[in-house]
Amino acid sequence: TLDTDHNALLMWFLTTFPETVKSMDESKHAFDDVIGINPYHTENRVLAHSLMVFKNSQIFCPENNIVKYSSLFHDLGKPIAREEVPERKRVRFLGHEGISAFMVVDILNKTELSEEDKLQIFKVVALHGSLFNYIKKDGTIKDDIKKTYEGNSRLLKDVVEQVRCDSFGRFFNPEIVEDNDVEFTKNLPEYFESIVNGLGDDVYRGNKPHQLTLLCGAPCSDKSAWLKGNSNGAVIISRDALVESVGKKYGMATYSDSWKWLKMKEHEKIEKEEVDAEMIRMVQTARREKKDVVIDMTLMSKKSRRKWINQFEKDYNKKCVLFIKGFDQQLKCNEERGKKEGKRINKYVTINMLKGFTLPMFGEGFDTIDYNWIPERF
């Protein structure tokens, strides 16, 4: 439960998810033992770092259960995201936040936490790596953060608390690491307090006559099932549907076959004229006729969502529906769908999508954001 104490939560994690624990213990921040330890993480192992961060949550904010859970699980995705850069003798974990966020869903679905609490933990894990992007070298905070976290006061407060725990949850080499300001990190919540207090916990931009809905979710996240009961006569823009339709026209039996066929160099013109151009035509017609529109794509990144938001005028209400299905559940669903429908997405395509995930926020221009939390099914 949410108020399970730190020791009990840790023992539950260690005994219930031994494979995940093992992978975190084997995953190192260093390139290799011969080259030497990563100066920013001399504790080296991902599990050691995670346990230190978790302990800090018990010290700094023992009553904040959201930070407790997100601190223990914030780096679940590092073993999968880990990449070695031989020419630099370095290791990087690009996009581990997105992988961690969807891995924590699988874990949270085995708890008795409320959906609201699960969602908050998911959000904090997804955002924990980006906070320092808003802090200038002189310690002041960029105004951009007010737009990013618009209507998310409580979320920013929890992210700041988690990042403080995270920043102290490591050992480092002081001869190399020069940007470690202990006092600044210790007082992180105080530095952000005035911003947090001014954000509010909702946004309202007025009623608009038309609606643009963006579906955001990795493959096998139940977007198609949602559409069946929620499209309400809107124009549905789906590149996958166009790919499959065009492929069948040329004799392809499945979506996977259609996708591969259209990616052949000799079929570039067909893809451009019958898929891309048709999608543009559908959007232009819908805008001209002021139809409600649903964009049925993965849209995992802020950039991919901005492309659609910017195409529709101010008289459109911008809504995002985020589909939250655990990483393991996504992979199992993909296997089942491949057997039944012939539509199978490579595991590494899914991983790369999760690496590129950025949490949809009001600051992107959304008027409303709905969260579709998907329970364990496989």
Image (cartoon, rainbow, N blue to C red):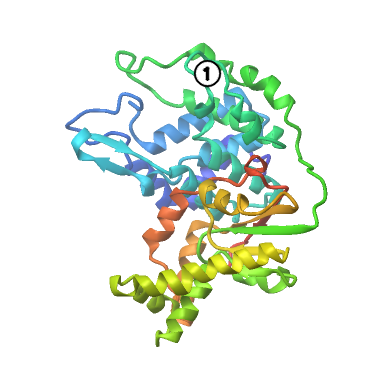
Residue at 35%, 25% in the rendered image: 40
Q: Farthest right residue? A: 207
Determine the secondary structure under disc 1.
helix
The picture places residue 234, in percent across and down from the top left corner, at 71, 69
The picture places residue 358, in percent across and down from the top left corner, at 53, 45
Q: In the rendered image, which residue does mark 1 sit on?
A: 185
Q: Farthest front residue? A: 288
Residue at 44%, 77% in the rendered image: 255
Q: Quadrant of residue 61?
A: top right
Nearer-the-camera pick, 184 or 230: 230
Nearer-the-camera pick, 117 or 176: 176
In this orientation, does residue 307 appear? yes
The picture places residue 226, in percent across and down from the top left corner, at 66, 68
Side (left or right) of 84 relative to 340: left
Residue at 38%, 65% in the rendered image: 346
Q: Quadrant of the C terminus?
A: bottom right
- In the depicted structure, whether residue 319 falls above or below residue 337: above
Amino acid type, residue under disc 1 in the picture: Thr
- In the depicted structure, whether residue 5 falls above or below residue 331: above
